[in-house]
Amino acid sequence: MSSEATYADWIAVDWGTSHLRAWAMRSDAPIAAATSDAGMGKLSRDGFEPALLSLIDPWLGLNATEVIVCGMAGSRQGWKEAPYVPVPCAVGHLPSVAVETASSKLAVRIVSGIRQDTPADVMRGEETQIAGYLALNPEFDGILCLPGTHTKWVHISAGEIVSFRTFMTGEMFSLLSKYSVLKHSVGDGWDTAAFGAAVTETLSRPESLAARLFSVRADGLLNGTETDAATATVSGLLIGAELAAARAYWLGQRVVLIGAEELSVAYGQALASQGVVAERADATDMTLNGLAAHRASLREHAS
């Protein structure tokens, strides 16, 4: 798909901290897609509408086109705050807020995020992927894991989010690999065996994480460890520690991974080492399903 398209019936938008993704939708199927680096973190409040228009203008007709947005555009620092809904909650019927726009071509709504007071936690964007999965699997009871910069473990029961927990594992890997002494050891490659061994190590002994991370650098200096093995080891150590802390979520549970291919494969391998055969669903597909489900809910309540 490309940004070239005929007019859209409506437009689906996932607005992250670093990127903006949009899809021209015909009924509930995408007919074109476009991406920019105009994430929430780079915009002032008055910059959101121009950033969106520059991306989706080829898809707009003369009348207002419906735009359904999830993600960080609804944060306190975003376009317009969409207040958090507390758990437990049914993600298929989340509220959204309308945004006043200067352009008459737009009719924008931003989906609310979700909050958990104890332990304190929040999500924006993932709730839409969860809604998309539950729209396809309404009888699902179990755990949805959404690997990413901030990985979410989410308990679903009776169509509701009961509880969830966020882990900064992806961000920690990024910081360590770019700004710590480990930047001299890691690269872009991968070693499946090294990853599995590291997962097992910190899953069994999470208290060893900080010391074991430094030993990755020492191994490179003293033993010439390849960067592929070092990269996989750092990732495995962090994910192993995460699994140790999230054990109450995945142990003995049905687990579905919703995320990017490469990261979902890694989490699947880590879980398989503990006897958990995780199912997988595509993150983009679930986002689009979730935004379509929200639009259908709006139309249902309007009728």
Image (cartoon, helix red, strand yellow):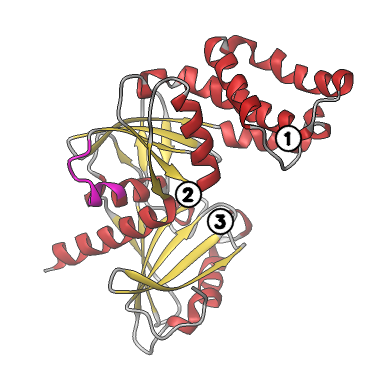
Q: Is residue 166 visible?
A: yes
- Could you tell me residue 153's position as x and y percent? 40, 32
Q: Residue at x 61, y 36 (%)?
A: 171
Residue under circle 3?
40
Q: Which mark is residue 39?
A: none
* Labels 3 and 1: the sequence-earlier one: 3
Pointer 3: residues within 10 angstroms few (<14), some, or many (20+)? many
**In the figure, 62 relative to 53: above or below?**
below
Query: From the viewer's perspective, is the residue at label 2 or at label 3 nearer?
Result: 3
Q: Residue at x 44, y 20 (%)?
A: 274
Residue under circle 1?
228
Residue 176, located in which quarter of the rendered image?
A: top right
Which segment is the magenta one? 133-140
Q: Secondary structure at mark 3?
A: helix
Residue under circle 2?
76
- For marks 2 and 1, give the CA distance: 40 Å
Q: Secondary structure at mark 2?
A: loop
* Labels 2 and 3: the sequence-earlier one: 3
Instruction: Please name whichever residue, 105 or 281, is drawn nearer the observer in this view of the structure.
Output: 281
Q: Which quarter of the rendering shows the C terminus?
A: bottom left
Pointer 2: residues within 10 angstroms few (<14), some, or many (20+)? few
Tell me the kind of residue under disc 3: Met
* Labels 2 and 1: the sequence-earlier one: 2
Q: Is residue 139 magenta?
A: yes
- For marks 3 and 1, give the CA distance: 33 Å
Instruction: Please name whichever residue, 226 or 171, is drawn nearer the observer in this view of the structure.
Output: 226
